[in-house]
Image (cartoon, rainbow, N blue to C red):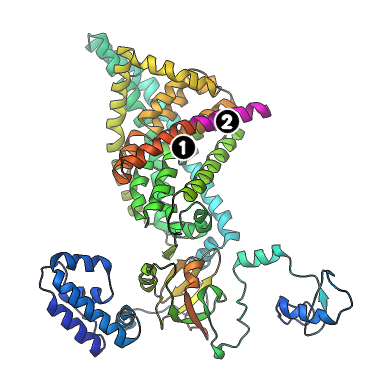
Amino acid sequence: MKCGMCGRRFHDQEAIQTCTSCPIVSNCGLVRCPYCGYEMPPEPKLVQWLKEAVGNRRSELSEVPAEFGPQMSLAKLGCGQCCRVVGVRADNGSGNHLMKLMAMGIYPGAQLQLIRRSPAVVYQCGYSQFAIDTELAECVTVRVEPSMEVEP
Amino acid sequence: MATVLYSPPLESQIRRIAELLRGSYSISKRSLALLLLSEDEEIASLVADQEPEAIRAIQRLAAESRTQDGQHIAYSIVEAQRSAAEQTFEGVIRRRDAGRMSWRERLSRATINPLTGIPALLLILLGLYWFVGVLGAQFLVDWLESSVFESGLNPWVNQLVNTAVPWEWAQQLLAGDYGVFTLGIRYAVAIILPIVGTFFLAFAVIEDSGYLPRLALLIDRLFKRIGLNGRAVIPMVLGFGCDTMATIVTRTLETTRERVIATMLLALAIPCSAQLGVIFAILAGHPLALAVWGLTVALVFLAVGYLTARLAPGEPPRFYMELPPLRVPRISNVLVKTYSRMEWYFKEVLPLFVLASVAIWLGQITGAFDGVVAALEPAVRALGLPEQTAVAFLFGFFRRDYGAAGLYDVQGLMNGAQLAVAAVTLTLFVPCIAQFGVMLKERGWKIAVGMLAFIVPFAFFIGWALNQILGWIGAGL
């Protein structure tokens, strides 16, 4: 989540670590920013769900500069981010979907741009847009790339 | 014709495989070799049928090349093809300036975002209701029924038949209450034609705009719960036009399991446009009854889908689809599509309507008709409906819309709650003869008969339960 005071983003796990110095044992119901110490209520489930529904939630790793090129599954990529496909894994033993994904532009070395993550993963490949469900997107490993020059 | 050139080792592989192929095929040896290298199952079995020795040697070669290359050979083929395609269009197309998003793209993204997409879907459904349910099923049907047939053609035909045909049995066959012309043709032209016509027109517009794949994407998660995936939305939506046509379209679904579930739901809970139009017309004066009908049918759809998905074993469905750009439909295209669908429908429906009229006439002459109606009456009474509706249920055996149209004739006898119960039962009740025929052909007799054996008692059970619940609440609607 994002700190209301300093604006930096942090994980819930990091916030829990800063709680160890606090005399109140537990259940204060607040989250403490690990950077500035500002305390605020946690992000409600509803807000998280809404962010997911709007589909604009950036990937957890999207704060990492693009040069690092972290590898992740296509389903975890942030909206608007570009990537290059590193590998495709078969799921549930049926190799059939590898061919389908290939026909839809997903094969090692292909360049994609993510458009939405919810309710299904939508990506741009060349001049076409495709939709696949989250389960299929989980099988695709990608490397984050600096954004492409073209918007459709 | 331009040929895509692959890397030298791949090219030599293609040549070696092409040389091994001796049979006669409709496509070139080179394409066959490429497809075999990509491990296309269909082509492999085709070649295996013609030359079983060659296929073994070819598969050995393909396996060798894969181990040398380290990665799936199909990938390098696709990559070469893509880069060749890119080079081809590099010279001939011009890119729009980047940065600004076009209105098409904005609209497209709005339709796949649940927050804006669901309201947009509701808006489209509302528009569809106005066009098909109000303009088609009420305005046009009223006009054709009352001005054209009842005050114009029917009396004229009755008189003509009475003076020209001397025998009473023949008079009854051609005209009168259940005559071929006065019932069969009237139902087909005055009630069914305007409804089906307006639906197919609206469906063609939606289809050509490219909205259906976006709807499939939006509804995918819900459909996964009932054992289908978003792709099944196309036969389902088409089912609102004609379930017979939609049952044929279930072929586009991948697994047998999905096809069975989709066929079941189409037969049970998806009313066809003619039925839908007549139901809208009947329930138009009772908005609460319309809501009860819609809610009950939707609940049955989801519950039965959920249970069928639990009962039918199989792999989880996967969703994948291309999203074509949104386009303004071309009028000529829409009209041609609507016309060809209506022609198909009419060829299907008119003979059956005439046949049904003849069957009812035969039943009346021999007294069998009264017997069946009498047998249905206790069932109808159990639903809390007037006895006259038994005729509508009997008609329902011949065609879904025929039954609903029969209900249209006796609507004055019922209150809102009774109309809701009758509409729900008729919606769930047996698929029409044509749909059942397609079910037999597509799914086999075991599954088709099994579905029918489930649907008939189940429809009456739901009708009975709804009647009990409404009576218990005391809702008159």
Which of these two is toward me, B72 or B403?
A: B72
Confirm whether circles 2 and 1 share one chain: yes
In magenta stretch: residue B461:
yes
Counting residues from the N terminus, which is met first, the one under dot 2 or under dot 1? 1
Is the N terminus of chain B in the top left, top right, bottom left or bottom right quadrant? bottom left
Percent position of residue A19, x then y: 81, 79
C-beta proximity under 8 Å, tags 2 and 1: no
Q: Quadrant of residue A58?
A: bottom right
Q: Chain of mark 2?
A: B
Mark 2: secondary structure = helix
Q: Amino acid at mark 2?
A: Ala
Q: In the rendered view, would you say B235 is above or below B375?
A: below
Residue located beneath label 1 in the image: B276
In magenta stretch: residue B398:
no
Q: Amino acid at mark 1?
A: Leu
Q: Which mark is residue B465?
A: 2
Q: Is residue B91 left or right of residue B412?
A: left
* Alpha carbon distance from label 2 to label 1: 22 Å
Q: In the rendered view, would you say A120 is above or below B18?
A: above
User: What residue appears at the point 14 percent right and 67 percent down from the top-left corner?
Assistant: B25
State the extent of the magenta-drawn residues as a range: B460-477
User: Dot 1 surroundings within 10 Å: few (below 14), some, or many (20 or more)?
Assistant: many
Which of these two is toward me, B271 or B250?
A: B250
Is the C terminus of chain B in the top left, top right, bottom left or bottom right quadrant? top right
